[in-house]
Amino acid sequence: SSSFAAAAAAAARGCRSSARQRHARAHARLENDTQIRHQRRRTRARATNGEDEDEFAIFRFTLGIPGFDDEDIPRAVGVLGAVGLCANHAAASASVIASGALERSETIGVGLCIACMLAPELGRRLKGAKGREKAIGEDVDGGASAVFALGEDESSSVKEDCAWATYAILTNTVATGVMFVNARGEVSVVRGTARGRDDGGVDASKSETLRRVTLAWTQATAASSAPTSPPSEYFPTRWDIDRVGANTWAFLPPAAEAIAVERAPAGGALLVWSDAARAFSRKDRAWFAALARKLDASTSSSMA
Protein backbone atom coordinates (compact mmCIF):
# COMPACT_ATOMS: atom_id res chain seq x y z
CA SER A 1 0.00 0.00 0.00
CA SER A 2 2.76 2.41 0.95
CA SER A 3 4.76 1.50 -2.18
CA PHE A 4 1.68 2.08 -4.31
CA ALA A 5 1.17 5.52 -2.76
CA ALA A 6 4.82 6.41 -3.36
CA ALA A 7 4.56 5.38 -7.00
CA ALA A 8 1.40 7.41 -7.42
CA ALA A 9 3.07 10.46 -5.88
CA ALA A 10 6.08 10.06 -8.16
CA ALA A 11 3.80 9.79 -11.18
CA ALA A 12 1.95 12.92 -10.09
CA ARG A 13 5.21 14.82 -9.73
CA GLY A 14 6.28 13.66 -13.19
CA CYS A 15 3.00 14.83 -14.67
CA ARG A 16 3.34 18.22 -12.99
CA SER A 17 6.94 18.52 -14.27
CA SER A 18 5.88 17.62 -17.81
CA ALA A 19 3.04 20.12 -17.62
CA ARG A 20 5.45 22.86 -16.48
CA GLN A 21 7.84 22.04 -19.33
CA ARG A 22 5.02 22.16 -21.88
CA HIS A 23 3.85 25.45 -20.45
CA ALA A 24 7.38 26.88 -20.63
CA ARG A 25 7.77 25.81 -24.26
CA ALA A 26 4.39 27.26 -25.19
CA HIS A 27 5.28 30.52 -23.44
CA ALA A 28 8.62 30.68 -25.28
CA ARG A 29 6.89 30.11 -28.63
CA LEU A 30 4.33 32.82 -27.81
CA GLU A 31 7.07 35.31 -26.94
CA ASN A 32 8.97 34.48 -30.14
CA ASP A 33 5.84 34.90 -32.28
CA THR A 34 5.10 38.20 -30.55
CA GLN A 35 8.62 39.49 -31.26
CA ILE A 36 8.32 38.48 -34.92
CA ARG A 37 4.97 40.26 -35.26
CA HIS A 38 6.36 43.41 -33.64
CA GLN A 39 9.37 43.32 -35.95
CA ARG A 40 7.12 42.99 -39.01
CA ARG A 41 4.99 45.89 -37.82
CA ARG A 42 8.10 48.07 -37.40
CA THR A 43 9.33 47.09 -40.86
CA ARG A 44 5.96 47.93 -42.44
CA ALA A 45 5.82 51.20 -40.57
CA ARG A 46 9.26 52.23 -41.84
CA ALA A 47 8.29 51.30 -45.40
CA THR A 48 4.98 53.20 -45.12
CA ASN A 49 6.40 56.31 -43.53
CA GLY A 50 9.34 56.44 -45.90
CA GLU A 51 11.84 56.74 -43.08
CA ASP A 52 14.47 54.68 -44.89
CA GLU A 53 15.68 55.70 -48.31
CA ASP A 54 16.15 53.03 -50.93
CA GLU A 55 19.87 52.44 -51.22
CA PHE A 56 21.38 50.01 -53.67
CA ALA A 57 24.88 48.88 -54.43
CA ILE A 58 26.55 46.83 -57.10
CA PHE A 59 29.45 44.70 -55.96
CA ARG A 60 32.12 43.43 -58.28
CA PHE A 61 35.00 41.24 -57.17
CA THR A 62 38.40 42.75 -58.00
CA LEU A 63 41.91 42.03 -56.84
CA GLY A 64 42.81 45.70 -56.85
CA ILE A 65 46.36 45.11 -58.16
CA PRO A 66 47.64 48.22 -59.99
CA GLY A 67 48.37 47.51 -63.66
CA PHE A 68 46.74 44.07 -63.55
CA ASP A 69 43.48 43.52 -65.40
CA ASP A 70 41.15 41.24 -63.43
CA GLU A 71 40.11 39.58 -66.68
CA ASP A 72 43.62 38.10 -66.86
CA ILE A 73 43.15 36.10 -63.65
CA PRO A 74 42.51 32.83 -65.56
CA ARG A 75 45.71 33.42 -67.55
CA ALA A 76 47.70 33.88 -64.32
CA VAL A 77 46.16 30.68 -62.93
CA GLY A 78 47.16 28.84 -66.12
CA VAL A 79 50.75 30.07 -65.86
CA LEU A 80 50.98 29.04 -62.21
CA GLY A 81 49.53 25.65 -63.09
CA ALA A 82 52.12 25.16 -65.83
CA VAL A 83 54.92 26.05 -63.42
CA GLY A 84 53.51 23.57 -60.93
CA LEU A 85 53.41 20.82 -63.57
CA CYS A 86 57.04 21.44 -64.46
CA ALA A 87 58.07 21.35 -60.80
CA ASN A 88 56.10 18.16 -60.22
CA HIS A 89 57.68 16.50 -63.25
CA ALA A 90 61.18 17.45 -62.11
CA ALA A 91 60.56 16.07 -58.63
CA ALA A 92 59.00 12.80 -59.78
CA SER A 93 61.04 9.63 -59.53
CA ALA A 94 61.98 7.49 -62.51
CA SER A 95 59.59 4.71 -61.51
CA VAL A 96 56.62 7.11 -61.39
CA ILE A 97 57.50 8.52 -64.81
CA ALA A 98 57.85 5.06 -66.26
CA SER A 99 54.45 3.94 -64.99
CA GLY A 100 52.58 6.27 -67.37
CA ALA A 101 50.24 7.66 -64.71
CA LEU A 102 52.20 10.90 -64.48
CA GLU A 103 52.10 11.33 -68.24
CA ARG A 104 48.31 11.04 -68.31
CA SER A 105 47.81 13.51 -65.47
CA GLU A 106 50.27 15.93 -67.05
CA THR A 107 48.42 15.75 -70.37
CA ILE A 108 45.17 16.74 -68.64
CA GLY A 109 46.96 19.47 -66.67
CA VAL A 110 48.54 20.93 -69.81
CA GLY A 111 45.11 21.06 -71.47
CA LEU A 112 43.60 22.89 -68.51
CA CYS A 113 46.50 25.36 -68.41
CA ILE A 114 46.10 26.14 -72.11
CA ALA A 115 42.34 26.65 -71.66
CA CYS A 116 42.96 29.06 -68.77
CA MET A 117 45.50 31.02 -70.78
CA LEU A 118 43.18 31.36 -73.78
CA ALA A 119 40.01 32.20 -71.80
CA PRO A 120 40.68 35.96 -71.33
CA GLU A 121 41.35 36.50 -75.04
CA LEU A 122 38.23 34.59 -76.04
CA GLY A 123 36.20 36.64 -73.54
CA ARG A 124 37.54 39.91 -74.96
CA ARG A 125 36.72 38.86 -78.50
CA LEU A 126 33.14 37.95 -77.57
CA LYS A 127 32.69 41.15 -75.57
CA GLY A 128 34.19 43.19 -78.39
CA ALA A 129 31.76 41.68 -80.89
CA LYS A 130 28.81 42.65 -78.68
CA GLY A 131 30.22 46.12 -78.16
CA ARG A 132 30.58 46.70 -81.89
CA GLU A 133 26.91 45.89 -82.34
CA LYS A 134 25.92 48.68 -79.96
CA ALA A 135 28.50 51.39 -80.47
CA ILE A 136 27.22 54.85 -79.58
CA GLY A 137 25.43 56.43 -82.53
CA GLU A 138 25.66 53.30 -84.67
CA ASP A 139 22.52 51.90 -86.27
CA VAL A 140 21.51 48.77 -84.37
CA ASP A 141 18.26 47.52 -85.83
CA GLY A 142 16.45 49.29 -88.64
CA GLY A 143 15.74 52.76 -87.29
CA ALA A 144 17.27 52.27 -83.84
CA SER A 145 20.67 53.29 -82.54
CA ALA A 146 22.69 52.97 -79.33
CA VAL A 147 22.72 56.19 -77.29
CA PHE A 148 23.85 57.46 -73.91
CA ALA A 149 22.86 61.04 -73.17
CA LEU A 150 22.75 62.84 -69.81
CA GLY A 151 21.22 66.23 -69.15
CA GLU A 152 24.01 68.80 -69.25
CA ASP A 153 22.11 71.13 -66.90
CA GLU A 154 21.77 68.47 -64.21
CA SER A 155 23.98 68.55 -61.12
CA SER A 156 26.89 66.16 -60.81
CA SER A 157 25.07 64.09 -58.18
CA VAL A 158 22.05 63.68 -60.45
CA LYS A 159 24.29 62.67 -63.34
CA GLU A 160 26.00 60.09 -61.14
CA ASP A 161 22.66 58.66 -59.98
CA CYS A 162 21.30 58.49 -63.53
CA ALA A 163 24.46 56.93 -64.92
CA TRP A 164 24.60 54.38 -62.11
CA ALA A 165 20.91 53.44 -62.29
CA THR A 166 20.85 52.99 -66.07
CA TYR A 167 24.06 50.95 -65.99
CA ALA A 168 22.66 48.74 -63.24
CA ILE A 169 19.45 48.11 -65.19
CA LEU A 170 21.19 47.30 -68.46
CA THR A 171 23.72 44.96 -66.86
CA ASN A 172 21.46 43.16 -64.37
CA THR A 173 18.38 42.58 -66.54
CA VAL A 174 17.65 41.78 -70.19
CA ALA A 175 16.72 45.42 -70.84
CA THR A 176 18.02 46.97 -74.05
CA GLY A 177 17.09 50.57 -73.30
CA VAL A 178 16.10 52.83 -70.42
CA MET A 179 15.23 56.45 -69.88
CA PHE A 180 14.14 58.63 -66.96
CA VAL A 181 11.84 61.64 -67.28
CA ASN A 182 11.94 64.16 -64.43
CA ALA A 183 8.97 65.95 -62.88
CA ARG A 184 9.27 68.80 -65.43
CA GLY A 185 8.66 66.34 -68.25
CA GLU A 186 12.27 66.55 -69.45
CA VAL A 187 14.35 63.46 -70.17
CA SER A 188 17.27 63.43 -67.74
CA VAL A 189 18.95 60.36 -69.22
CA VAL A 190 18.44 57.92 -72.07
CA ARG A 191 20.73 54.93 -72.46
CA GLY A 192 20.84 51.81 -74.57
CA THR A 193 18.93 51.21 -77.78
CA ALA A 194 16.48 53.94 -78.79
CA ARG A 195 14.74 54.99 -81.98
CA GLY A 196 16.94 57.13 -84.18
CA ARG A 197 16.15 60.15 -86.29
CA ASP A 198 13.60 59.81 -89.07
CA ASP A 199 16.13 60.89 -91.70
CA GLY A 200 18.57 58.20 -90.57
CA GLY A 201 21.17 60.74 -89.48
CA VAL A 202 23.04 61.01 -86.20
CA ASP A 203 22.33 63.67 -83.59
CA ALA A 204 24.97 66.39 -83.54
CA SER A 205 25.21 66.31 -79.74
CA LYS A 206 23.82 64.58 -76.68
CA SER A 207 21.76 67.68 -75.94
CA GLU A 208 20.07 67.29 -79.32
CA THR A 209 19.37 63.64 -78.50
CA LEU A 210 17.73 64.61 -75.22
CA ARG A 211 15.65 67.33 -76.89
CA ARG A 212 14.47 64.88 -79.54
CA VAL A 213 13.57 62.20 -77.00
CA THR A 214 11.89 64.75 -74.72
CA LEU A 215 9.76 65.97 -77.63
CA ALA A 216 8.82 62.38 -78.43
CA TRP A 217 7.80 61.79 -74.79
CA THR A 218 5.76 65.00 -74.72
CA GLN A 219 3.93 63.98 -77.89
CA ALA A 220 3.30 60.51 -76.50
CA THR A 221 1.80 61.79 -73.24
CA ALA A 222 -0.33 64.33 -75.12
CA ALA A 223 -1.72 61.76 -77.56
CA SER A 224 -4.85 59.76 -76.86
CA SER A 225 -2.81 56.55 -77.00
CA ALA A 226 -0.35 57.79 -74.38
CA PRO A 227 0.17 55.88 -71.15
CA THR A 228 -2.30 56.64 -68.39
CA SER A 229 -1.45 57.65 -64.85
CA PRO A 230 -1.15 54.38 -62.87
CA PRO A 231 2.09 54.27 -60.88
CA SER A 232 3.10 51.04 -62.58
CA GLU A 233 2.43 49.74 -66.09
CA TYR A 234 3.77 46.69 -67.86
CA PHE A 235 3.30 45.68 -71.47
CA PRO A 236 4.87 42.21 -71.68
CA THR A 237 4.30 41.45 -75.39
CA ARG A 238 4.20 43.22 -78.71
CA TRP A 239 0.45 42.72 -78.81
CA ASP A 240 0.08 44.69 -75.57
CA ILE A 241 2.35 47.42 -76.92
CA ASP A 242 0.29 47.74 -80.11
CA ARG A 243 -2.99 47.54 -78.18
CA VAL A 244 -2.24 50.65 -76.08
CA GLY A 245 -0.63 52.51 -78.99
CA ALA A 246 2.87 52.49 -77.49
CA ASN A 247 4.24 51.47 -80.89
CA THR A 248 3.77 55.12 -81.90
CA TRP A 249 6.13 56.43 -79.22
CA ALA A 250 8.88 58.05 -81.26
CA PHE A 251 11.63 57.16 -78.79
CA LEU A 252 10.83 53.44 -78.66
CA PRO A 253 12.94 51.20 -80.94
CA PRO A 254 10.94 49.19 -83.51
CA ALA A 255 12.22 45.89 -82.09
CA ALA A 256 10.87 46.50 -78.57
CA GLU A 257 8.81 43.55 -77.33
CA ALA A 258 8.24 44.54 -73.68
CA ILE A 259 7.96 47.86 -71.81
CA ALA A 260 7.85 48.65 -68.10
CA VAL A 261 6.78 52.13 -66.93
CA GLU A 262 7.25 53.11 -63.28
CA ARG A 263 6.07 56.51 -62.04
CA ALA A 264 7.25 58.20 -58.86
CA PRO A 265 5.22 60.40 -56.47
CA ALA A 266 6.85 63.70 -57.50
CA GLY A 267 6.05 63.13 -61.17
CA GLY A 268 9.15 61.42 -62.55
CA ALA A 269 8.88 58.32 -64.71
CA LEU A 270 11.29 55.49 -65.46
CA LEU A 271 10.80 53.60 -68.73
CA VAL A 272 12.60 50.34 -69.47
CA TRP A 273 12.22 48.27 -72.63
CA SER A 274 13.59 45.04 -74.04
CA ASP A 275 13.74 43.16 -77.33
CA ALA A 276 12.50 40.02 -75.54
CA ALA A 277 8.85 39.38 -74.75
CA ARG A 278 7.93 39.04 -71.05
CA ALA A 279 11.40 40.29 -70.23
CA PHE A 280 10.77 41.67 -66.74
CA SER A 281 9.66 39.71 -63.70
CA ARG A 282 7.75 41.14 -60.75
CA LYS A 283 11.02 41.40 -58.86
CA ASP A 284 12.57 43.39 -61.74
CA ARG A 285 9.62 45.77 -61.84
CA ALA A 286 9.69 46.27 -58.07
CA TRP A 287 13.36 47.17 -58.42
CA PHE A 288 12.54 49.58 -61.26
CA ALA A 289 9.94 51.26 -59.03
CA ALA A 290 12.50 51.74 -56.26
CA LEU A 291 14.99 53.20 -58.75
CA ALA A 292 12.30 55.51 -60.11
CA ARG A 293 11.66 56.85 -56.61
CA LYS A 294 15.37 57.33 -56.01
CA LEU A 295 15.93 59.19 -59.29
CA ASP A 296 12.75 61.18 -58.74
CA ALA A 297 13.95 62.31 -55.32
CA SER A 298 17.40 63.12 -56.69
CA THR A 299 16.13 65.24 -59.60
CA SER A 300 13.43 66.92 -57.47
CA SER A 301 15.96 68.02 -54.85
CA SER A 302 18.18 69.35 -57.62
CA MET A 303 15.29 71.41 -59.03
CA ALA A 304 14.37 72.83 -55.62
Image: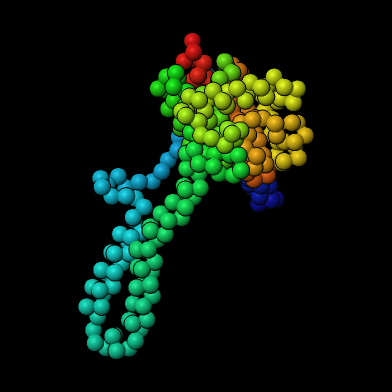
At which x and y percent is residue 141?
Answer: 59, 44
Q: Is residue 294 visible?
A: no
Look at 37% across and 81% down and name the residue there. Answer: 104
Q: Is residue 296 above or below residue 111?
A: above
Task: Residue at 44%, 22% (x, y): give it.
Answer: 152
Q: According to the image, what is the colour scheme of the structure?
A: rainbow
* Side of 281 relative to 130 (left or right): right
Q: Is residue 100 above or below residue 80?
A: below
The residue lying toward the viewer, choosing from 148 and 27, is: 148
Residue closest to the eye, 160 or 245: 245
85 and 260: which one is in front? 260
Coordinates of residue 303 in the picture (x, y in percent):
49, 13
| Residue 284, picture quadrant | top right
Going 40% across and 22% down the picture, which residue do you hit? 156
Residue 178 appears anywhere in the view: yes
Badge count: 0
Residue 213 versus residue 153 in the image, above or below: below
Picture residue at 63% right of the left edge, 21% below the top: 218
Name which quarter of the figure residue 287 lies in.
top right
x%, y% of residue 144?
58, 39
Is residue 274 toward the left or the right of residue 106 in the image? right
Residue 184 vs residue 147, the one in the foreground: 147
Percent position of residue 76, x then y:
30, 59
